[in-house]
Amino acid sequence: MEVGLNHFLIVSTILFSFGLYGIVTRKNAIMVLMGVELILNAANINFVAFSSFGNFGINGQLYALFVIILAAAEAAIALAIVLNIYKTFSKVNIDEINNLKD
Amino acid sequence: MLENLITDANLIVPEIIVAVTLLLVVLFDLIFHKDKSIIPYIGIVGLFAALYYAIQGLPQNSYAFTTAATSHQYGLLAIDSFGSYFKILILITSILIIFFSKASSEIQRIKDRSGEYYALIMGMVLGMLFMVSASDLIIIYLSVELLSLSSYVLAGFTKLRDRNSEASLKYLIYGAVSSGLMLFGISLLYGMTGNTNLIAINTVLRNSSINILTYSFSLILIFVGIGFKISAVPFHFWTPDVYEGSPISITAFLSVASKAAGFALLIRFIKTAFILNETDSGSWSMIEFFDWQTFIIIISILTMTLGNFVALWQNNLKRMLAYSSIAHAGYMLLGVAVLSNQGILAVMIHFLVYMLMNIGAFYIVMLIANKTGSEDIDDYNRLGYASPFLGVSLSIFLISLTGLPPLAGFISKLYIFLAVIDAKLITVAVIAVINSVVSLYYYIRVLKHMFLKKADQEPKGLKLAPAEIVFVLILLIPTIIFGLYFTPMIEFARNSLSILGY
């Protein structure tokens, strides 16, 4: 069986769905951020697969590189903020950190 | 190659100046580690220089950073007068916010970290400047992230109270999710069209058929990212919490500049990528696959109705202004939904006025919070008599936000409603007017507390520094004058309508 574009798209859609599922169901801030990483990587797979199977040139692969770098930067800032939250509240559960209310 | 680089660099002088200012701020932060009072002035000088070049750049119309294959005439950034108009607005807002921060006691209490604070503000400005001229999906994503990453940190920067950290976390979670969804949408659109440049995408969409379902899905995902920035319902959940928890200077910055950049991005995205042609009267006909008008009208009605109705029972002034800014995003989305140059003109005018009155309102809330330490509406009882200047100025800003004559807010709102009526969307216009009436209640409620309510104990008059009075007057006088003599404002916006594209 030849591995084609559809196989990559199926993998990326599965990753995207797992990511979204994680974001919606998990309460721990770190787990939510991991869900976001899954979505970013699903997009990366899309970029690389489209650029190599669709004859669009290598632009898509370059975009994937940009996204990887940004994901790293975002993870650094996100973990710093979560660490700060842990120092303030001694927990990282999003539902329990709810002092600002209507 | 080098010549190209120099020509392109000439087109983005304001961005380069802001980037250099960012580095200078970081450098001076390291050099002067004892006394950091010079740092905000470096920022102000840099921003004024950038503003000068942005005004110089108004007549420019060309693409910067065209791709190596020069067969097509488009680039990563579109430098046009529409972009320059929003750059000018953003730079003026940033200058005001730096003065704002200098007066805020929250920021004065973190003096030893003020270098990082101003460096991050410069990061935000840089992201916004790129956002308003981005004409390539990948630049859109990168600039949105540049803006977001700086503002996540700034939202929780002061760490004086628990609510600062909480605001930061909420902003981070919602922001990361929505930008992730946006990126996935971008990747799908790239797969369908083979391009990330908005104009190239437009060419592809004109000439080929496309899978409507995937196409709509990708556009909605991209809209999630932009809708998060402009706090449109249903992507608004972060807004009240972040606005209440952030330092108030950052709240004002997010509510004006970041929203302006988001709107500029949305308008350019729709206008360059999905327009079929523009009639002489200035209305756009769109590529048929996706009904932008209905989509944006639904979002905008939801946005303004929710903003106005939830604002009715807010007792914290910052939170009330947050919902009011959601409602204003709804009005401005109506201007976009008209899909015509007239609608865009109305949005541009409204932003100019919104900048004056919203920063003004936040500034006075900040001055009062400096002294009383809270933004609760009960602390405003009889304040109008204790400090008449603040009371009257805040009243004028709030009445202008409602959109009553003879203030500038009336003119800009009128232009939006006129554009909606001209597009024969009468029902929508009626809903918008009813919303305006509802909004009157919560703005006037503040006035009632300031002038009519009895206080438990008579509040003391607030002493104001001359600089603070000047700052309020700088915002107050145009708010009144533009309400009576509005031709220059409208001419300025009308001359900046050109968006590069088809």
Image (cartoon, coloured by chain):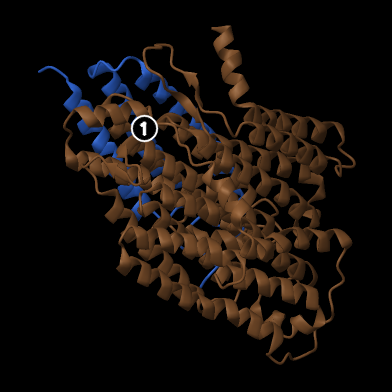
Q: Looking at the rendering, which quadrant does residue A35 occupy? A: top left
Specify whether B443 is left or right of B25: left
Mark 1 residue element: helix
Question: What tint does the image give chain A?
Answer: blue
Which residue is at a point 39% across and 39% down the rendered structure image?
A: B269
Tell me if A90 is positioned left or right of B207 in this view: right
Q: Foreground: B203 or A74?
A: B203
Residue ID for mark 1: A41
Lateral position of residue B321 relative to residue B303, left or right? right
According to the rendering, which colour does chain B have? brown
Count of numbered tags: 1
Which x, y percent locates residue B495? 54, 42
Closer to the camera, B24 or B93? B93
B432 and B497: which is toward the camera: B497
Residue at (46% x, 25% y) in the render: B76
Label 1 Cα crowd, 10 Å radius (few <14 / some 14-19 / many 20+): many
Residue at (55% x, 71% y) in the render: B402
Q: Which of the 4 image quarters holds residue A51?
A: top left
Above or below for B331 versus B116: below
Report x, y in % for residue A5: 19, 23
Q: Position of residue B422 (x, y in %)?
A: 36, 59
Q: Amino acid at mark 1?
A: Asn
In percent of the image, x 88 and y 62: which residue is there?
Answer: B466
Circle 1 chain: A
Q: Is residue B489 above or below residue B388?
A: above
